[in-house]
Image: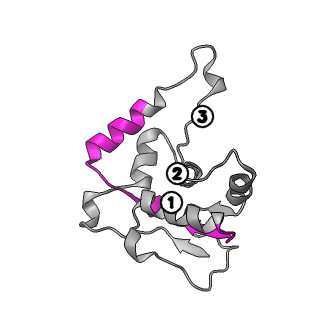
Amino acid sequence: VYVDATNQIAGRLASKVAKLILSGRRVVVLNSEKALISGSRNSVMRQWNERLELSSKVNPIYGPIHPRRPDNIMRRMVRGMVPRKKPSGDTAMKRLRVYVGQPSDVKVTKLTAFGDTGATRPIPGYVTMQELSKNLGWSG
């Protein structure tokens, strides 16, 4: 299943994708940088920046490792909705591919967009994954 994340709310999209990969389907999410995060711009940016301050006191390299790229943020959102410590969740995550943009080697016949994951308010009222990633330090 090829899913287009353009103008889709990220959390709702992640729950649909998690359901599909747990049922045994292979899912490819394209244009992850165009997914939307709901909430006021200031509060979204503040909450994500506060999350970056979490680290190990012993040695920060031990984690938690914080994703900054849009595709990794989306993959992490889906991972939070899958029982990843069980074998079913581990194999389900192997069925997921998330891309920034649309790679040239992926031949898409039909893109799927879930109807109930779309934006309900005007698009400028949301924060895109690209804006969030730029704020977190992604240089892409």
Please tell me whether mark 2 sits on a helix, a strand or a loop.
helix
* Residue identifier under label 3: 65
Mark 3–mark 2 distance (CA, rounded to whole Å): 14 Å
Instruction: Provide the residue designation for mark 1.
Output: 14
Tell me residue 29's x, y (percent): 57, 66
Mark 3 vs mark 1, CA separation in Å: 20 Å
Residue 77 marker:
2
| Discs 3/1, front | 1
Q: Quadrant of residue 129?
A: bottom left
Q: Report the residue at 45% width, 40% height from top.
A: 136
At mark 1, the secondary structure is: helix
Label 3 is placed on what type of residue?
Answer: Ile
**Label 1 crowding class (10 Å Cα cut-off): few <14, some 14-19, many 20+?**
many
Return the residue nearer the eye: 123 or 12: 12
Q: Secondary structure at mark 3?
A: loop
Q: Quadrant of the N terminus?
A: bottom right
Q: Which image quadrant for residue 9?
A: bottom left
Q: Which amino acid, mark 1?
A: Ala
Would you say 65 lies left or right of 85 here? left
Residue stretch in magenta: 23-50
Residue 37 within the magenta-colored segment of the rendering: yes
Front of the two marks 3 and 2? 2
* In this rendering, position of residue 7 left or right of residue 108: left
Residue drawn 48% across and 67% down?
A: 5
Identify the mark nearer the N-term, 1 or 2.
1
Q: Are marks 1 and 2 in contact (CB under 8 Å)?
A: yes
Disc 2 marks a residue whose amino acid type is: Met
Provide residue 25's location: percent of width, then percent of height: 67, 72
Task: Give the distance between the C-alpha atoms of the residues marked 1 and 2, in whole angstroms.
Answer: 6 Å
